[in-house]
Image (spheres, helix red, strand yellow):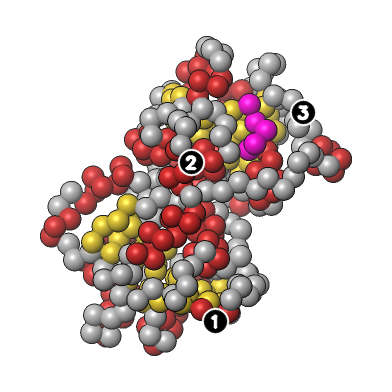
Amino acid sequence: MRKFSIVGSHGYRASYGGWDALVNNLVDLRSEGGETLVFNPRETPVTLPGNQSDATVIQLPLSASGIQGLVYDSVSIILSAFKGFNILMLGMGAMPVMTAVKIMFLGKPYVVVNVGGIEWERPQFGRLARAYLKLCFWLARKTADVIILDNDHYLKFIENHERDRAKVAVIPYGGDIDYSIDKPTNAMIERFPFLGKNYFLSISRSIEDNKIRELCREFVGVDDSDLVVCSNFSASEYGRSILHEYSGHQNIYLVDGLYEKPVIDYLRRNCTAYIHTHTLCGSAPSLIEIIVAARPVIAIDVPQNRFTLANSGGYFSDFSQLLPLLRSGPIDRFLPKPGLAASYAWTDIVRRYEDCFLK
């Protein structure tokens, strides 16, 4: 029964974000006796996983981004059904197609959907997009076999779940840290001049609900505190505007498009503390990674972050509270609680995903 395809990602060995780490681990840590099929878009070269007897990667001549991404997901769903695979959907965008396939195939394949958070709350979506995402969420509840939420906070959106067809599983992302870089090379020091100093780190996508602009604004002109923000700044108008506005400040370092895990994990391991500003994420991968790295965490005070941190770390509800909080005592008091990292081990997360396909 642990035979499933993965639909809705940038494919195996992509490095765009949290879902890509999930896909890579679902393939690399798969159980014996299972079988996994992954679809790669044209922008992700095919890398063959180990033990090819039970893992297959198929590249489609389509992009995983933009409007074409919906076609890419839809083709992946149809091919999976014809090949006799159960389906793990990452995201809800192609849920109408999945519903049609379930009807055409008389209730097959068995479908598990990671709904990817409550996406219609994000400010970048207009009225029509939000209505479509709500429709997809409703279809997932009514036609999927299992829906996965990545944070306990989202259970409030399915309080009357007993009326739905889908079962519910709460499974966060996993996390791991690369320790292969023991000390920075000369090239790294030139690239990241803040290394060797005390710096506060924040990592997020350049979208409005991650509050990067508000964070940078608080550090302008602060002589005794350096801020490092890693993001895909060049990928959006919002991100580019932040680069334009804050790149000239001596104590603010904006790192654009860093996807080298050994390097970004070195930045994580050596920061004074991590500042988490995501307001609408579930179990944000960047937050889980810093928990595993065992660095102090100060997070914006929303329920999702408290669930992920198990109420450890420090919290601020307004950005004006941030610097006073950082200066109010020993920074180590914001360390995640001991043992919390173990709950985000990838081996356990992968088994929980696989178990969703056990009827």
Give the percent coordinates (x, y) of residue 218: 57, 22
Q: Give the numbered dot on residue 341.
A: 2
Which residue is rendered at x = 43% and y = 83% of the image? 79
**Majority secondary structure of the magenta segment?**
loop
Residue 329: image x %, image y %? 54, 12
Residue 81 seen from this side: yes
Q: Of the two numbered discs 3 and 2 on the same chain, state the one appearing first in sequence.
A: 3
Q: In the image, is residue 353 above or below residue 295?
A: below
Span of residues in magenta: 268-272
Amino acid of disc 1: Ser
Secondary structure under tag 1 reads helix
Mark closer to the observer (3, 2): 2
* Number of the front mark, 3 or 1: 1
Task: List the single residue furthest toward the right.
Answer: 186
Q: Is residue 317 magenta?
A: no
Q: Residue at x 42, y 87 (%)?
A: 83
Q: Report the disc number at residue 53.
A: 1
Crowdedness near tag 3: few (<14), some (14–19) or many (≥20) residues, C-alpha within 10 Å: few
Q: Quadrant of residue 309 in the image?
A: top left
Is there CB contact under 8 Å for labels 1 and 2? no
| Residue receiving disc 3 | 196
- Classify mark 3: helix, strand or loop: loop
Going by the numbered disc 3, the residue's amino acid type is Gly
| In the depicted structure, whether residue 109 falls above or below residue 317 | below
Task: Find residue 235 and report its horizontal and vertical position in percent.
Answer: 61, 52
Q: In the figure, 48 relative to 213: above or below?
A: below
Q: Residue furthest left?
A: 163
